[in-house]
Amino acid sequence: MKLQNFITETLVQINEGVKNAKHKLESNQLQINPYLTERLSGLAENPDLIGFSEGKKIVQMVNFDISVTAESENDKSGNIKVASSIIEVGFLGKKKNIEQNVSKIKFSIPISFPNSHEK
């Protein structure tokens, strides 16, 4: 997969995941990507706390660090493409080449949990 396609698909999937979470939490008080009414000073002390949303709810970051692995197998006579790693395995006299690409994605989404008195 080309880098540009990977980036496009990654951003689309993150967006869909955020939209799905918002839809499932409509009746809940948890806010995903809330509007900030006030930013916190001293962000270097705790970069995960970024400010307050409407109603003075604390907004914090949920951090994701994900590894995505794509793998394909070819028998010994097949063609092998250049990959981040190529592994040759043998089992019961049959050899296969396994082509594996690993990509890392790191991103954060701001959220605001409900206050303890909210139901």
Image: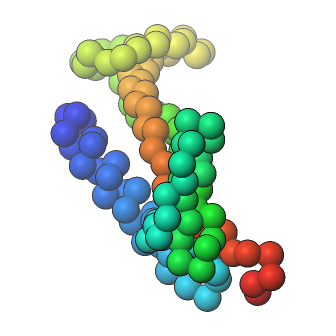
Picture quadrant of residue 77: top left
Tell me, yes or no, if residue 78 can be seen here: yes
Q: Is residue 47 above or below residue 76?
A: below
Q: In the displayed orientation, state which residue is furthest to the right.
A: 117
Which quadrant of the figure contains the C terminus?
bottom right
Which residue is pictured at 40% across the width and 31% down the height? 103
Which residue is pictured at 46% across the width and 38% down the height? 106
Which quadrant of the figure contains the N terminus?
top left
Q: Position of residue 104 (x, y in %)?
A: 44, 32
Q: Is residue 24 above or below residue 52?
A: below
Q: Position of residue 110 (x, y in %)?
A: 51, 58
Left or right side of 82 for 116:
right
Which colour scheme appears in the figure? rainbow
Tell me, yes or no, if residue 21 can be seen here: no
The answer to which of 24 and 35 lies nearer the viewer is: 35
The answer to which of 103 and 39 lies nearer the viewer is: 39
Q: In the displayed orientation, state which residue is furthest to the front.
A: 41
Q: Position of residue 21 (x, y in %)?
A: 53, 71
Q: Is residue 117 above or below residue 35?
A: below
Q: Position of residue 33 (x, y in %)?
A: 46, 66
Which residue is pictured at 63% across the width and 71% down the height? 57
How many discs appear?
A: 0
Picture quadrant of residue 17: bottom left
The answer to which of 85 and 111 lies nearer the viewer is: 111
Which residue is pictured at 37% across the width and 57% down the height? 13
